[in-house]
Amino acid sequence: MVTDQQVRRLFDVQNRYEYQYQVADAAGISRKTAHKYLTGGKLPSHCKVEHTWPTRQDPFAEDWAFIEQLLKDTQAALEAKTLFDYLQRAYPGKYHNGQLRTLQRRIKAWKALYGPAKEVFFSQHYDPGQWSCSDFTSMNKLSITIARQPFDHLFYHFVLCYSNWQAGRICFSESLESLSLGIQNALWKLGGVPFYHRTDNLTSAVHKVGHPDIFTDKYRGLAGHYGFESSKTNPASPHENGDIEKSNDLFKNAVDQSLIIRGSRDFDTVEEYEKFLQKIIDRMNQNCHKRFAEEMEVLKGLPNLRYDDYETKTCKVGRGGTFRLLHNTYSAHSRLVGETVKVRVYADKLEIWYAQRHIETLPRLRGENGHYINYRHHIDRLVRKPGAFENYCYKDDLFPTSQFRIAYDILREAYSIRQASKEYLKILELAAKESESLVNEALRLLINLEEEISFEKVKAFIDSKQKTPEPTEVYIEPVDINDYDMLLEMPECVCV
């Protein structure tokens, strides 16, 4: 095949030689070919004819008008495979499976020429200190465990769009409290406030379509306190917040790689896991020092105090010593039965207030229809009503550890139901008043020694202040794999 380079060489040397065959030899092509290009005066690439004619008969020509109308009516939402399956059912034997690719190519070309417009992604330019964005991303695919138990959680992620400086924290829901706490922690760690902050269309910050106000009162209060202007993406359009979406992917990939190097995805505590994530973020932030310094020069200053990162709810403690909050049940001290308390709802905890005093702090439950019952709240009344214990709907919450559960089962075998409940509740009351850990150790000792369990023995153990022996260590010798090979080499045993 003659190339453009050879023909250019032919044109260059045509006046250097007397005969045409000499010119052809100098260009490295045949005399006939040289005559063709010298006469035409065009390069090979300019002589090619555009291929616009079909090379074979279109198998879908008869039904193309019907296919095209379906594509128009459905805004090109139908896939070629769906249309092909429909044609095969409508016209049995007319179309065979090998023609699917032909239909796919025709529909692809039609969409490009006549179909609806596609989404266009517009590259953004950011100035220092102007834009920040945040998002919640699920970390469940990383298979993190805490003390060998699966740990389902989210990660709140905050990013400065110009320098890609980032911050974040573990959270368990996309609530307003989690959003407020995440933003404030990021801003105080940053030491300044950008002019704009963009989030997804979060229900915790954005009203439903049709509401006169775009953002909720609480979120507008947060933005006003720090002085940033709020922005949001359109519903179901995460690509509009592409900076944070890409940062999510990079961060989770960095966490995954660090976990592989670490050799384990299990952590002893949530705090240990949190420190592990913060080290990764700090390491990633080291790559943006120059641009980060530019942002720090133009960021707005922080206010004197943080904004309240909690929501206050009013709850009445019912006759059962419990109250309902955010579709979950919590216990309160029996002294508060019938009283109205104020609950400060944080991202991961609840603060109980009564008469302008902070009474106690409870963990915030995730999901719905859960319950948190603290046996210390009701033990004083249960001791007086031991008959209510056996069928109590929250009975399982009154076993602080497995040792308490085992002790109760042993008491049930030794005494009647009422007597066993009475004895166990006295032990539980001792745990509430003295020390749960000491009572747990006393029960462990009595269970291991297979002695009779009673309130008097547990009380005597605590009063003696004796130290319980350490749990027995079980040593298992390593298995020699060669022993199994010896079994294979043994002669077969014949059973008669």
Image (cartoon, rainbow, N blue to C red):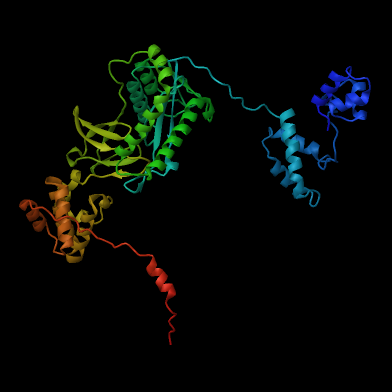
User: Which residue appears at 41% of the width and 73% of the height?
Assistant: 487
Q: Relative to 454, does residue 72 appear above or below in the rendering?
A: above
Tell me: 88 left or right of 269. Answer: right
Report the front residue among 442 and 18. 18
User: Which residue appears at 79% of the width and 25% of the height?
Assistant: 5
Which quadrant does the C terminus fall into? bottom left
Where residue 207 appears, as percent x and y from the top left, is 45, 25
- Using the rendered view, name the quadrant where residue 292 is placed: top left
Where residue 428 appears, as percent x and y from the top left, is 16, 51
User: Which residue appears at 28% of the width and 51% of the height?
Assistant: 393
Q: Can residue 114 be seen in this view?
A: no
Tell me: 57 left or right of 130. Answer: right
Q: Can residue 73 be seen in this view?
A: yes
User: Which residue appears at 20% of the width and 62% of the height?
Assistant: 410
Where residue 483 appears, as percent x and y from the top left, is 37, 69
Q: Relative to 409, does residue 233 appear above or below in the rendering?
A: above
- Using the rendered view, name the quadrant where residue 71 is placed: top right
- Using the rendered view, name the quadrant where residue 8 is placed: top right
Which quadrant does the N terminus fall into? top right
Report the front residue among 490 and 455. 490
Q: Relative to 454, does residue 112 appear above or below in the rendering?
A: above
Report the front residue among 244 and 343. 244
Tell me: 231 left or right of 281. Answer: right
Where residue 13 appears, as percent x and y from the top left, is 86, 19
Number of on-image labels: 0
Residue lying furthest bottom: 496
Tell me: 134 left or right of 311. Answer: right
